[in-house]
Image (cartoon, grey):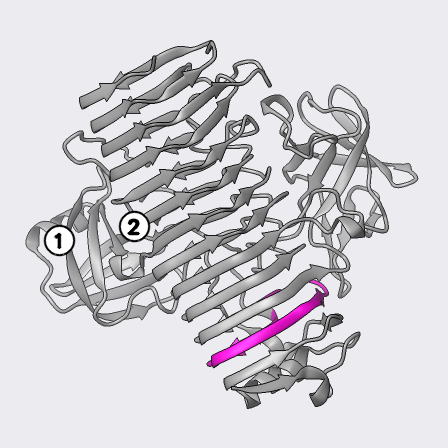
Amino acid sequence: MKTIRLKDYGILPDTDITLALCELFRNNPRDTEFVFEDADYYFTPYEEMRYDYRVSNSDVTPYRVLGLWMRDMENCKLTGNGARLYYAGHMQAVTMDHCKNITMSGLVIDWKKPLVAEGVAVAIGEKHIDMYIDPVAFPHRFTGSNVEFDVGNDEWYPLLVRNCLQYDAEHMIASRVNGNSFVPWSAEDLGDNVYRLHACSEVHARVGNVFILRHNMRMHAGIFAEKCENVTVNDVTVHSCGGLGCLAQFCHGMTFNGLHFVPNTKAGRKVSSGRDDGFHLTNNSGTMTISGCTFLGLMDDPINVHSCCCPVESVVDDYTLKCRYGHEEAKGFHYWAEKGDEITLIRRGNLEQLGSLTTAEYELIDLETFYLRFNEPIPEEIKQIATDGKLTVDNYNHTAAFVCRGNRFGSSNCRGMLISTPKPVLVENNYFLSSGSPIVIPGDAMYWFESGPCRDVVIRNNVFTDACLTADYQDCYGVISISPQVPEPDINIPFHRNIRITDNVFDTADTPVLYAYSVKGLEFKNNRIYKSYAAPKWHPNDCKIKLRYCVDADVSGNEWIGKFDFGNEVILDGENLNIITE
């Protein structure tokens, strides 16, 4: 492997290196280590760096604006030595496309003008908050009716009608259920960078608390990888980005060690980091590993692992289905299916898996629809279900095993992690302060279309603090919430299977510890659950454990420490259950 030091090729600190670095990559695509200095480097938008990537769970745009761009590279290393990469305006910081055996380490990704802002409450009224916004840390202007933020490259984005997450000023933990968010609808300029932000209903806040002010669009990931294999990211910090922090789609085998989504406190930011999720791992294969990572101040889930199912519109012929992408933010993919892929057929009502067929051809019609042709003829009963509008398809080849080990889930918006994959899952030795449910095991074919029934999940040796489940986000029915959206549940057709939750520590202020829906083979054993007095009981699930449509569940051998102010368990439509909560 040859070594290229950027400075030897005229790529120098404190300069714009966007085009020069892209050219250097293009000329050295194999067996090369690229070495940065411990210095500042800059990236700005160029028309030559625009490309039509169909990015999962993001706003659909004709192109993405790219910064560091690697295409068709193999056996290469990016050695950062602590280099700070600064971007201007809406850009995708790092893009890896059809790369293999790549290692990236020792880099910091940031914006001088960040893509998320903050405000501090200085006074509070019944339906308004007077908020100070630091003009140096968060450059902005008042237009006469709204606050707009400068993110660089002469791009300004308005604030109003955006959910603003509130953090306790002392502990930097998202405030509890009565005041966790604030949606401003109008604004006044009070002078000295203080703005009166009006809401449509009563506000709950404290003077001194910090609000994350999310603006702009979800257009670009911080780190994006598509059709890559065996990528390793070590010791990389992301201080800001304008969308998903790290998005990998249609990749095989990726490892993230020490990827930190945290605020740049030296730049005057108290808690904000990314605009949306931390990791979004969509339609991948092999094993995806996340270890030793840190999350704080994200405006969506730190981790989401899933595939993408698609409803069937019609039967074209004996071998062909016409399908459509179900969600507005996930469509038009180039690689949703490829020749030889195993396509799972799913009944939408009870999410029963009806069998599978092998892909002969995948053809995009437009961003919303595609043809799926099979090697085998489509069975008549499947044709009828499709004709009735009750068939969904998923790609089994694009599901990944997942390992999540030794991470710190600091307080962020929404949940801690969402897991939807049939391949083996291991979640161990993590520390959670997630404001919603730390772990959600969902799955649906109706709204998000984030599919993947779990078949083998181990959750062990984790710590769930009393900062968890302080707000009622979607699917947050318990500290661990197994909550697929099955509109027509059938106890004989469980959605998830073989979920084992053992040897964990829970500290709970009378919030339900476990909720499980449509599971066969559930184990919740040898856990220690402590009663916390951090807050009064608030959650509508007034019980320690709640099971619905579960079969073969064993909840026993746990240690419940303290006097809990709610009931023991609620069981609905279950079979062969051993539940002991004393």
Q: Position of residue 146 (x, y in %)?
A: 78, 43
Q: Position of residue 171 (x, y in %)?
A: 69, 31
Pick whichever of labels 1 and 2 is earlier in the sequence. Answer: 1
Residue for point 63% across, 56% down:
242
Of 237 and 453, nearer the camera is 237
Residue 488, x across and y down, in percent? 23, 32
- Compared across the picture, whether 212 is left or right of 364 comes to right
Q: Closest to the observer: 265 or 481? A: 265
Relative to 488, is 71 on the left or the right?
A: right
Q: Residues within 10 Å of mark 1 (few under 14, many from 20)?
A: some
List x then y, in percent, for residue 39.
Answer: 76, 70
Judge whether 510 appears above or below 324 on screen. above
Amino acid identity at mark 2: Pro
The residue where tag 1 is placed is 383
| 203 is higher (above) or lower (below) than 330 | above
- Report the magenta residues as a range: 66-95
